[in-house]
Protein backbone atom coordinates (compact mmCIF):
# COMPACT_ATOMS: atom_id res chain seq x y z
CA UNK A 1 0.00 0.00 0.00
CA UNK A 2 1.22 3.51 -0.82
CA UNK A 3 2.41 5.62 2.11
CA UNK A 4 1.69 9.24 2.97
CA UNK A 5 -1.30 11.22 1.72
CA UNK A 6 -2.23 8.63 -0.94
CA UNK A 7 -2.37 5.69 1.51
CA UNK A 8 -5.30 3.47 0.62
CA UNK A 9 -6.93 5.98 -1.72
CA UNK A 10 -5.10 4.65 -4.78
CA UNK A 11 -6.77 1.27 -4.28
CA UNK A 12 -10.27 2.52 -5.08
CA UNK A 13 -11.22 4.19 -8.34
CA UNK A 14 -14.43 5.75 -6.98
CA UNK A 15 -13.03 7.34 -3.80
CA UNK A 16 -11.50 10.82 -3.71
CA UNK A 17 -8.41 11.40 -1.57
CA UNK A 18 -8.54 14.24 1.01
CA UNK A 19 -6.74 16.44 -1.57
CA UNK A 20 -9.57 15.83 -4.05
CA UNK A 21 -7.64 13.48 -6.36
CA UNK A 22 -8.55 10.20 -8.04
CA UNK A 23 -5.26 8.32 -8.04
CA UNK A 24 -6.35 5.50 -10.36
CA UNK A 25 -7.29 8.03 -13.06
CA UNK A 26 -3.90 9.72 -12.63
CA UNK A 27 -2.22 6.32 -12.95
CA UNK A 28 -4.12 5.77 -16.23
CA UNK A 29 -2.43 8.89 -17.62
CA UNK A 30 0.93 7.43 -16.54
CA UNK A 31 0.05 4.18 -18.33
CA UNK A 32 -0.37 6.19 -21.57
CA UNK A 33 3.22 7.42 -21.23
CA UNK A 34 4.61 4.04 -20.13
CA UNK A 35 4.71 2.73 -23.73
CA UNK A 36 7.32 5.41 -24.61
CA UNK A 37 5.52 6.61 -27.70
CA UNK A 38 4.56 10.04 -29.04
CA UNK A 39 1.82 11.11 -31.45
CA UNK A 40 1.12 14.55 -32.92
CA UNK A 41 -1.90 16.02 -34.70
CA UNK A 42 -1.86 19.07 -37.00
CA UNK A 43 -4.80 20.97 -38.48
CA UNK A 44 -4.22 22.94 -41.67
CA UNK A 45 -6.59 25.12 -43.73
CA UNK A 46 -7.95 22.26 -45.80
CA UNK A 47 -6.46 19.14 -44.20
CA UNK A 48 -5.61 17.45 -40.92
CA UNK A 49 -2.62 15.16 -40.30
CA UNK A 50 -1.65 12.72 -37.54
CA UNK A 51 1.83 11.24 -37.11
CA UNK A 52 3.45 8.69 -34.78
CA UNK A 53 6.32 6.22 -34.60
CA UNK A 54 5.96 2.75 -36.03
CA UNK A 55 7.64 0.53 -33.45
CA UNK A 56 8.06 -3.16 -34.27
CA UNK A 57 9.13 -4.75 -30.96
CA UNK A 58 10.54 -7.99 -32.41
CA UNK A 59 12.33 -8.89 -35.65
CA UNK A 60 10.05 -11.90 -36.08
CA UNK A 61 6.91 -9.74 -36.19
CA UNK A 62 5.44 -8.85 -39.58
CA UNK A 63 5.67 -5.01 -39.69
CA UNK A 64 2.44 -4.73 -41.71
CA UNK A 65 0.51 -6.14 -38.74
CA UNK A 66 1.78 -3.42 -36.34
CA UNK A 67 -0.03 -0.08 -36.34
CA UNK A 68 -1.29 2.63 -34.01
CA UNK A 69 -3.54 4.25 -36.64
CA UNK A 70 -7.03 2.98 -37.34
CA UNK A 71 -9.86 3.78 -39.73
CA UNK A 72 -13.12 4.11 -37.78
CA UNK A 73 -15.29 5.06 -40.76
CA UNK A 74 -14.11 5.73 -44.34
CA UNK A 75 -13.99 9.45 -43.39
CA UNK A 76 -12.68 9.33 -39.80
CA UNK A 77 -9.31 8.03 -38.64
CA UNK A 78 -7.45 8.04 -35.35
CA UNK A 79 -4.12 7.44 -33.68
CA UNK A 80 -3.85 5.69 -30.30
CA UNK A 81 -1.13 6.10 -27.69
CA UNK A 82 -1.05 3.81 -24.67
CA UNK A 83 -1.92 0.18 -23.98
CA UNK A 84 -2.62 -1.59 -27.28
CA UNK A 85 -5.28 -3.99 -25.98
CA UNK A 86 -7.23 -1.15 -24.35
CA UNK A 87 -6.96 0.76 -27.62
CA UNK A 88 -8.37 -2.13 -29.65
CA UNK A 89 -11.38 -2.24 -27.32
CA UNK A 90 -11.93 1.50 -27.76
CA UNK A 91 -11.66 1.23 -31.57
CA UNK A 92 -14.29 -1.52 -31.60
CA UNK A 93 -16.60 0.69 -29.52
CA UNK A 94 -15.98 3.69 -31.81
CA UNK A 95 -16.83 1.67 -34.94
CA UNK A 96 -20.00 0.41 -33.26
CA UNK A 97 -21.04 3.98 -32.32
CA UNK A 98 -20.35 5.22 -35.87
CA UNK A 99 -22.30 2.36 -37.48
CA UNK A 100 -25.24 2.84 -35.11
CA UNK A 101 -25.33 6.59 -35.81
CA UNK A 102 -25.37 6.08 -39.59
CA UNK A 103 -28.08 3.40 -39.33
CA UNK A 104 -30.24 5.65 -37.13
CA UNK A 105 -29.79 9.02 -38.86
CA UNK A 106 -28.77 8.12 -42.42
CA UNK A 107 -25.54 10.14 -42.58
CA UNK A 108 -21.96 9.77 -41.33
CA UNK A 109 -21.22 10.57 -37.70
CA UNK A 110 -19.50 13.99 -37.21
CA UNK A 111 -16.02 13.89 -35.66
CA UNK A 112 -16.96 16.05 -32.67
CA UNK A 113 -19.95 13.82 -31.83
CA UNK A 114 -17.84 10.64 -32.05
CA UNK A 115 -15.22 12.29 -29.79
CA UNK A 116 -17.99 13.11 -27.30
CA UNK A 117 -19.27 9.51 -27.31
CA UNK A 118 -15.75 8.10 -26.78
CA UNK A 119 -15.09 10.56 -23.96
CA UNK A 120 -18.44 9.65 -22.35
CA UNK A 121 -17.42 5.98 -22.46
CA UNK A 122 -14.06 6.75 -20.83
CA UNK A 123 -15.74 8.87 -18.16
CA UNK A 124 -18.16 6.07 -17.19
CA UNK A 125 -15.10 3.85 -16.61
CA UNK A 126 -13.99 6.24 -13.83
CA UNK A 127 -17.29 5.98 -11.92
CA UNK A 128 -17.64 2.27 -11.16
CA UNK A 129 -15.58 0.11 -8.82
CA UNK A 130 -15.91 -2.93 -11.10
CA UNK A 131 -14.28 -1.09 -14.04
CA UNK A 132 -10.90 0.51 -14.58
CA UNK A 133 -9.99 3.49 -16.79
CA UNK A 134 -8.60 2.66 -20.22
CA UNK A 135 -4.87 3.45 -20.38
CA UNK A 136 -5.04 5.02 -23.83
CA UNK A 137 -5.42 8.43 -25.48
CA UNK A 138 -7.28 8.70 -28.79
CA UNK A 139 -6.72 11.48 -31.34
CA UNK A 140 -9.50 11.66 -33.96
CA UNK A 141 -9.36 13.41 -37.34
CA UNK A 142 -11.88 14.02 -40.10
CA UNK A 143 -13.45 16.59 -42.42
CA UNK A 144 -16.73 18.24 -41.42
CA UNK A 145 -19.00 19.47 -44.24
CA UNK A 146 -19.67 22.73 -42.39
CA UNK A 147 -16.66 23.20 -40.09
CA UNK A 148 -13.85 21.87 -42.30
CA UNK A 149 -10.89 19.92 -40.85
CA UNK A 150 -11.43 18.58 -37.34
CA UNK A 151 -8.90 17.40 -34.74
CA UNK A 152 -10.08 16.05 -31.36
CA UNK A 153 -8.33 14.31 -28.48
CA UNK A 154 -9.97 12.08 -25.83
CA UNK A 155 -8.17 11.09 -22.62
CA UNK A 156 -8.66 8.40 -19.92
CA UNK A 157 -10.51 10.83 -17.63
CA UNK A 158 -13.26 11.37 -20.21
CA UNK A 159 -12.26 14.84 -21.44
CA UNK A 160 -12.49 15.67 -25.15
CA UNK A 161 -11.23 18.91 -26.71
CA UNK A 162 -10.82 20.24 -30.25
CA UNK A 163 -7.31 21.39 -31.22
CA UNK A 164 -5.36 23.28 -33.87
CA UNK A 165 -2.44 20.99 -32.99
CA UNK A 166 -2.07 18.43 -30.20
CA UNK A 167 0.27 15.86 -28.72
CA UNK A 168 -0.06 12.55 -26.84
CA UNK A 169 2.40 10.34 -24.99
CA UNK A 170 5.94 11.01 -23.78
CA UNK A 171 7.58 14.42 -24.29
CA UNK A 172 4.11 15.95 -24.38
CA UNK A 173 5.20 19.13 -22.57
CA UNK A 174 8.16 19.74 -24.92
CA UNK A 175 5.89 19.01 -27.88
CA UNK A 176 3.18 21.39 -26.63
CA UNK A 177 5.72 24.22 -26.22
CA UNK A 178 7.07 23.53 -29.71
CA UNK A 179 3.59 23.48 -31.29
CA UNK A 180 2.52 26.67 -29.52
CA UNK A 181 5.44 28.50 -31.17
CA UNK A 182 4.59 27.04 -34.59
CA UNK A 183 0.92 28.04 -34.35
CA UNK A 184 1.47 31.39 -32.59
CA UNK A 185 0.88 33.37 -35.80
CA UNK A 186 -2.08 31.21 -36.95
CA UNK A 187 -0.33 30.06 -40.14
CA UNK A 188 -2.32 29.31 -43.31
CA UNK A 189 -1.24 25.76 -44.16
CA UNK A 190 -1.94 23.89 -47.39
CA UNK A 191 -2.12 20.08 -47.39
CA UNK A 192 1.53 19.74 -48.49
CA UNK A 193 2.72 22.28 -45.89
CA UNK A 194 0.74 20.54 -43.12
CA UNK A 195 2.35 17.17 -43.90
CA UNK A 196 5.82 18.72 -44.06
CA UNK A 197 5.23 20.58 -40.77
CA UNK A 198 4.04 17.35 -39.11
CA UNK A 199 7.09 15.32 -40.14
CA UNK A 200 9.67 18.07 -39.48
CA UNK A 201 8.12 18.90 -36.07
CA UNK A 202 8.06 15.23 -35.09
CA UNK A 203 11.76 14.88 -35.92
CA UNK A 204 12.63 18.11 -34.05
CA UNK A 205 10.69 17.19 -30.89
CA UNK A 206 12.14 13.67 -30.63
CA UNK A 207 15.57 14.78 -31.97
CA UNK A 208 15.72 11.77 -34.31
CA UNK A 209 16.18 11.55 -38.08
CA UNK A 210 13.54 8.99 -38.97
CA UNK A 211 13.43 6.62 -41.92
CA UNK A 212 10.16 6.24 -43.82
CA UNK A 213 9.65 2.77 -42.31
CA UNK A 214 9.80 4.26 -38.78
CA UNK A 215 6.82 6.60 -39.27
CA UNK A 216 3.07 6.36 -39.69
CA UNK A 217 1.29 9.37 -41.19
CA UNK A 218 -2.49 9.60 -41.57
CA UNK A 219 -4.28 12.35 -43.49
CA UNK A 220 -7.74 13.63 -44.34
CA UNK A 221 -8.10 16.59 -46.73
CA UNK A 222 -10.80 18.56 -48.53
CA UNK A 223 -9.56 17.19 -51.87
CA UNK A 224 -9.60 13.62 -50.54
CA UNK A 225 -11.92 13.43 -47.49
CA UNK A 226 -11.33 9.70 -46.96
CA UNK A 227 -8.85 8.77 -44.22
CA UNK A 228 -5.61 7.47 -45.75
CA UNK A 229 -2.20 6.37 -44.51
CA UNK A 230 0.74 7.66 -46.53
CA UNK A 231 2.83 4.94 -48.17
CA UNK A 232 6.54 4.56 -47.35
CA UNK A 233 7.38 6.04 -50.78
CA UNK A 234 5.28 9.15 -50.06
CA UNK A 235 6.80 9.59 -46.57
CA UNK A 236 10.28 9.16 -48.09
CA UNK A 237 9.49 11.92 -50.61
CA UNK A 238 8.56 14.35 -47.81
CA UNK A 239 11.64 13.37 -45.77
CA UNK A 240 13.83 14.16 -48.79
CA UNK A 241 12.10 17.52 -49.30
CA UNK A 242 12.62 18.42 -45.62
CA UNK A 243 16.30 17.36 -45.75
CA UNK A 244 16.88 19.47 -48.89
CA UNK A 245 15.07 22.47 -47.37
CA UNK A 246 17.13 22.33 -44.16
Image (tube, grey):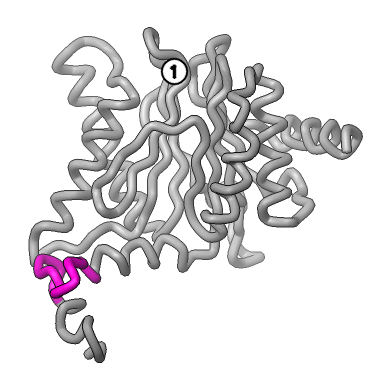
Q: Position of residue 181 (x, y in %)?
A: 63, 39
Q: Name above or below for residue 2 compared with residue 137.
A: below
Q: Which of the 4 image quadrants contains residue 50?
A: top right
For the stretch drawn in magenta, the main secondary structure is: loop
Residue receiving disc 1: 143
Question: In the image, what residue occupies the spot 53% across and 60% down?
Answer: 170
Residue sitting nearer the eye, 222 or 231: 222
Residue 18 part of the magenta segment: yes
Q: What residue is at 76 percent from the left and 33 percent from the top?
A: 233
Q: Quadrant of the N terminus?
A: bottom left
Towards the viewer: 188 or 33: 188
**Residue 92 part of the magenta segment:** no
Q: Secondary structure at mark 1?
A: strand
Viewed as shown, does residue 211 lie left or right of 110? right
Of residue 212 and residue 190, the one placed in the foreground of this image is 190
In this rendering, the answer to whether 34 lies above or below 92 is: below
The percent coordinates of residue 175 (x first, y second) are 58, 50
Q: State the image coordinates of residue 31 (x, y, percent, origin top left).
A: 38, 66
- Examine the image and state in which quarter residue 197 appears: top right
Left or right: 200, with 66 as reference point: right
Question: Which stretch is magenta?
Answer: 12-23
- Residue at position x 62%, y 26% from top? 185
Mark 1 closeness class: few <14, some 14–19, many ≥20 residues within 10 Å: many
Q: Which residue does the image show at 49% across and 19% down from the upper left? A: 226
Amino acid sequence: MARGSSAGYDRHITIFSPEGRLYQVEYAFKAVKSVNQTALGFRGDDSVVIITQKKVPDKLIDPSSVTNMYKITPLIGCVLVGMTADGKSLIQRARHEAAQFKYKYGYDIPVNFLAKRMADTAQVYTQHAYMRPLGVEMTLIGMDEELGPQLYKCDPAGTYIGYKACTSGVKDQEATNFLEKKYKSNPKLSTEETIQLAISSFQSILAVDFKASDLEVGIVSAASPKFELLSQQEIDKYLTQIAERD
